[in-house]
Image (tube, rainbow, N blue to C red):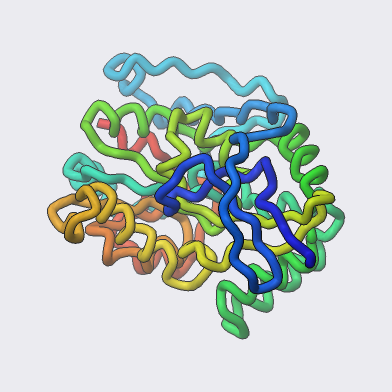
Amino acid sequence: MNRALFGSLVAISATDSSRGVSSLAGAGEPLEPVVVGRRNSLPPASPIFKPIVPSKLNGLGARHGLHHQAPTNGNGMTNDRPVELSKRTTEAKESLKKAQIVCFDVDSTIITEEGIDELAQFCGKGSEVAALTKEAMGGSMTFQEALKRRLDIIKPSQRQIREFLKTHPSIISAGVKELIEQLRKNNAEIFLISGGFDCLIEPVADALEIPLCNLYANRLFFNYNGSYAGFDTTQPTSRSGGKGEAIKQIRSVMAGGVGTGADKVVAMIGDGMTDLEACPPANMFIGYGGNAVREEVQKRATYYVTNFADLLW
């Protein structure tokens, strides 16, 4: 029987009730879970924090104790999206103050890149995946089908993912750390909800001190020899509407598993349509265009910012 094991790189999804437990996946045959370590790989390179562009911080540094230096990685990383794309930033800031739960998208929001595209490029499948992504954006397939087809092209092995993590540290968007610190001081609980893969997002969560139980993302399966074996289709983020489903689960967890936690004010922040469509059940959506501007999202969002510094108070 061709059994597959959750790779030791793969963090346990936040939707699991038992943390630190992985599962064996057989050919249609459920097996008892086995306990595995959180990671069994060389530690990945630390994510790079992208500084806020200084002009956006006039007066903010003194009030919040923020200190930013010019980028040292040689590629001039600053947030320079046109400010005219922003919408109702003052109202967004005031609304965010009321949020008790703040959910962030990851790719092109918390980090500057799209993880699956970067992984595809690293595995030598960049052009093929880009072509499929373009086709999927035309609405010719479901989110889960598009995810499956892209992964079937990439077929990332555990070894490739380890090397990718070591050599391609994520770049964390300008102002994210400061915003999260501010939200925590305001007693908000922070979650990451991503259509990407938890094994790629773990280092980012660590860098931002977000516990893995607050991470909702997709999980990869690997065979015992480390080759790619598929992905977990039971995760809500693996299908259309999944981010809204994840928010419902978060509400339930925050309510102690009883009721819907309807009294909790939830904010969703992200760059894409899947983030926009998660409101409702989220009470508010703030579009973010600091890394990539999705025209339809910018058009439909009530609030839209191009720099996280705009949300600092």
Q: How far across and down, in percent of the image, does residue 205 sit?
A: 50, 36
Q: How far across and down, in percent of the image, does residue 67 sit?
A: 44, 15
Can the viewer see residue 221? yes
Q: Residue at x 30, y 19 (%)?
A: 64
Question: Residue 154: which quarter of the image?
Answer: bottom right
Question: Residue 69: which quarter of the image?
Answer: top right
Can the viewer see residue 90? no
- The quadrant the N terminus occupies is bottom right
Looking at the image, which residue sits at the far bottom?
140
Question: In the image, is residue 115 above or below residue 168?
Answer: below
- The quadrant the C terminus occupies is top left
Please tell me which residue lies in front, 146 or 233: 233
Q: Is residue 126 left or right of residue 219?
A: right
Q: Is residue 104 left or right of residue 253?
A: right
Q: Residue at x 33, y 58 (%)?
A: 249
Question: In the image, is residue 309 above or below residue 115?
Answer: above
Q: How far across and down, in percent of the image, does residue 302 sit?
A: 28, 61
